[in-house]
Image (cartoon, rainbow, N blue to C red):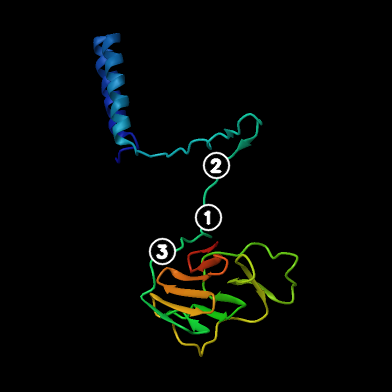
Amino acid sequence: MEDSEHGPAVRVFAAAQGSLRMRHSPRALATLVGAAWILAGCGGTTKTVIVQGPPAPATSGGAGGQTSTPTSSTATTAKTPSEAPTSIVHREAFLSPTGNIGCMIVAGTSARCDIVKRNWSPPPRPSSCPNVVDFGQGLEVGNGAARFVCAGDTARDPSSGKLRYGTASQVGAFTCVSRVTGVTCTDSSTGHGFTISVQGYRLF
């Protein structure tokens, strides 16, 4: 006959009962019962349970009595590379080496890059961007701070040449650098710009 789930323990416990019927020793009974339960535990299945602790408490905001809750960063940020380009060209339109990002630079106006595949989403459409055009398909800088594109066209021209990694395209005050980590465009007249990549984006 096959053993039950705690077969060895049952047999030990039965043997203990039989032996104690003959010896009538309470101490022996307690000892053998304990051994039986130990064997039962050894024969069972062990499960590991991971318990997640409670969330971190809010921290005090000081004399004002305000509190703040810790927040985690999202995938919608990208570091701005600091490596200088190895060469400079003067192209008003270009694609990234993969063709996923397309950019256009208009002297005295703006620099814009649109992207096809990405792992992030733009913020909600602002009321200033009408529903008849697209929003957030790229980033642009010019006439102020960098911002999300609100337009019905695209900066990706399939006929544009590809800008090799480590190369910059400079037109007027705007410079866009192609890197493995994405494309960074800067307006030297204001210091504003952006970085755009598959992994994230950054406005500065």
Residue under pointer 2: 70
Q: Secondary structure at mark 2?
A: loop
Query: Which circle, 2 or 3, is nearer the viewer?
Result: 3
Q: Mark 3 highlights which residue?
A: 82
Give the secondary structure at mark 1. Answer: loop
Dot 2 or dot 3: first in sequence order is 2
Identify whether 74 is placed above or below 6. below
Q: Are marks 2 and 1 in contact (CB under 8 Å)?
A: no
Q: Amino acid at mark 3?
A: Ser
Q: Quadrant of residue 141?
A: bottom right
* On screen, residue 34 above or below 138: above
Tell me the kind of residue under disc 1: Thr
Q: Foreground: 113 or 56?
A: 113
Residue at the far front in the pictured view: 189
For label 1, the residue is 74
Could you say where residue 82 lies in the image, as x and y percent from the top left?
Answer: 41, 64
Hey, which quadrant is residue 110 in on the image? bottom right
Question: Spatial distance from mark 2 to mark 3, Cα to Cα?
Answer: 29 Å
Separation of disc 2 and disc 1 at Cα? 13 Å
Could you say where residue 148 lies in the image, as x and y percent from the top left? 62, 68
Give the spatial CA distance, label 1 vs label 3. Answer: 22 Å
Mark 1 vs 3: CB contact within 8 A: no
